[in-house]
Image (cartoon, grey):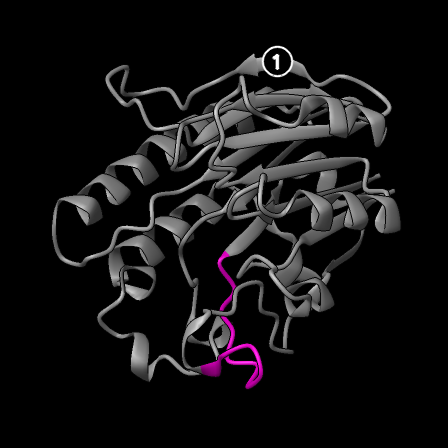
Amino acid sequence: MRIATWNINNIHSRLPLLLAWLDATRPDVVALQEIKSTERDFPMAELQSAGYGALVVGQKTWNGVALLARGSDPVLIRRALPGDPQDAQARYLEAAIGGVIVASLYLPNGNPWPGPKFDYKLAWFERLIAHAAELWKTDHPVVLAGDYNVVPTDADIYSPKTWLDNALLQPEPREAYRRLLEQGWTDALRKLHPQEPVYTFWDYRRNRWARNAGLRIDHLLLSKSLKARLVGAGVDKPVRGIEGASDHAPAWVDLA
């Protein structure tokens, strides 16, 4: 079972790229972020023609998450992260797919730092930690997949020097990510690639793609029962080099 996550950065402008990637790789589950689409405008028919059922939590212009399932329809569990009923940003979707609970999450970027957007990032992270703890207690197989907007360590970035004032590298979100892992979750990419640089994001600016000046901010966290089933993990890096691509590449795990 292959589960992938991809910040598509506008599903409408990158739909042909998404469809080509789905056809070439045939993942069983895909968590999408930053779809920048309402549910009404989401390209459901095109994805169904490609063999995928979908659930969507959309928002016009910004944010938005989706879950795709090959050959089936995801079974909705929740459409928002618990903990703040006033939060109107479309950043979390959770569903049952093929016997696994999968969440597509888009953690706030938090820039400019410091400021209210960074405060919102930290508050959202605390809500995620609390909900993840509840999911962990169930002993269900769970994958928390998405764009976490946090570089966990300096080993997850080509060079931290020019990013020191960026919200992605601040001590507080790094500490929050560490506390999340301490619940027992397995960071699949780092588990299978403990030493080598693994990047999922290359900024459009300063020729960073050509220089492989990347960051690892897209993560797939596995619950206890899935750790033993982890047989592969990687990043479809060439997708980032296609003209008109998102600044993120798809990351994935294979589960036996």
Q: Does 68 appear in magenta?
A: no
| Nearest the eye: 247 or 213 | 247
**Quadrant in the rendering for residue 46:** top right
Mark 1: secondary structure: strand
- The residue identified by callout 1 is 76
Whole-percent x, y for residue 67 in the image? 64, 29
In which quadrant is the C terminus drawn?
Answer: top right
Answer above or below: position of 191 versus 226. Answer: below
| Nearest the eye: 220 or 235 | 235
Residue 90 is left or right of residue 216, and the answer is: left
Please report the residue visible at 26 percent of the width from the left and 51 percent of the height from the top: 110
Residue 256 is left or right of residue 12, and the answer is: right
Residue bounds of the magenta highlight: 207-217
Whole-percent x, y for residue 248 in the image? 56, 59
Asked if residue 137 can be seen in this view, the reply is no
**Quadrant in the rendering for residue 129:** top left
Please report the residue visible at 31 percent of the width from the left and 74 percent of the height from the top: 163
Whole-percent x, y for residue 50 in the image? 84, 32
| Nearest the eye: 139 or 70 | 70
Q: Does 212 appear in magenta?
A: yes
| Nearest the eye: 251 or 140 | 251
Label 1 Cα crowd, 10 Å radius (few <14 / some 14-19 / many 20+): some
Please report the residue visible at 69 percent of the width from the left and 38 percent of the height from the top: 30
Residue 5 is left or right of residue 162, and the answer is: right
Answer above or below: position of 200 versus 146. Answer: below
Asked if residue 35 can be seen in this view, the reply is yes
Please report the residue visible at 72 percent of the width from the left and 46 percent of the height from the top: 16
Considering every residue shown, the one lying at the far left of the view is 115
Q: Which amino acid does label 1 sit on?
A: Leu
